[in-house]
Image (cartoon, rainbow, N blue to C red):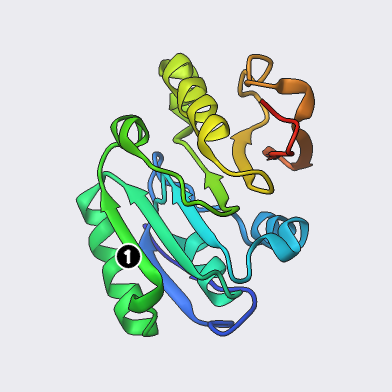
Amino acid sequence: MRTHIRIVAGSLRGRRLTCTVNANLRPTPQMVREALFSILGNAVPDRPFFDIFAGTGVVGLEAISRGASCVTFIERDFRLIGELERHIAAFGVGEYARLARTDVYRWVEHWQAPNEPVTVFLSPPFRDFEQRLEDLLNVIAQLQERVQPGSVIVLQAESKAPLDELPARADWDERRYGRNHLLIWVKNNETV
């Protein structure tokens, strides 16, 4: 099914992405994106942003629209990357976008975090919470370990996702929007 997703705010406000939605691809709803960027506030402008399991790339494009210094999209599906490349070109934001067509679980093994605070958004396929939970928790733990203090990691999950085993679980702030949950973790200087 083809659908249109609107960018909510910033320099690309009102621009639309056209994408094909299926059972494995559920773009972050507009209400959740609005809440996400409201929560992130100053953790977006002039900072590197990573859209992990990018899918349509709408969250990363929203980050570009709101002033992120650059956005790295990590997605393994070549069709989604192709659509994302077309949107980046059509919106004229290629200088702010980097595309990594690779499996997130392999990418994280070699990822070198920038030497500055970053914002990381993860929206894994909901089935990964059931079928690859250990691998997913490992990705999150590696991100937490490598990012600089002041960095923010956001995980989007479904309400039924098993989240009790998240690394540093007590340090995650959780917000609920219907069946969508946003979990936010900030690396402090004391965080190990």
Q: Nearer the viewer, residue 159 or 173?
A: 173
Mark 1 surroundings: few (<14), some (14-19) or many (≥20) residues within 10 A: many
Identify the secondary structure beneath mark 1.
helix
Q: Nearer the viewer, residue 23 or 77?
A: 77
Q: Give the image quarter of residue 70.
A: bottom left
Q: Is residue 9 visible?
A: yes
Residue picked out by circle 1? 84
Q: Nearer the viewer, residue 150 or 29?
A: 150
Q: How many numbered circles does the render carry?
A: 1
Residue 190 pos. (x, y %): 75, 31
Identity of the residue drawn at 33% across and 77% down = 94
Identity of the residue drawn at 27% across and 58% down = 81
The quarter of the picture where the C terminus appears is top right
Q: Give the image quarter of residue 171.
A: top right
- In the displayed structure, 143 sits above or below 78; it is above
Identity of the residue drawn at 31% across and 35% down = 110
Residue 135 left/right relative to 183: left
Residue 74 left/right relative to 191: left
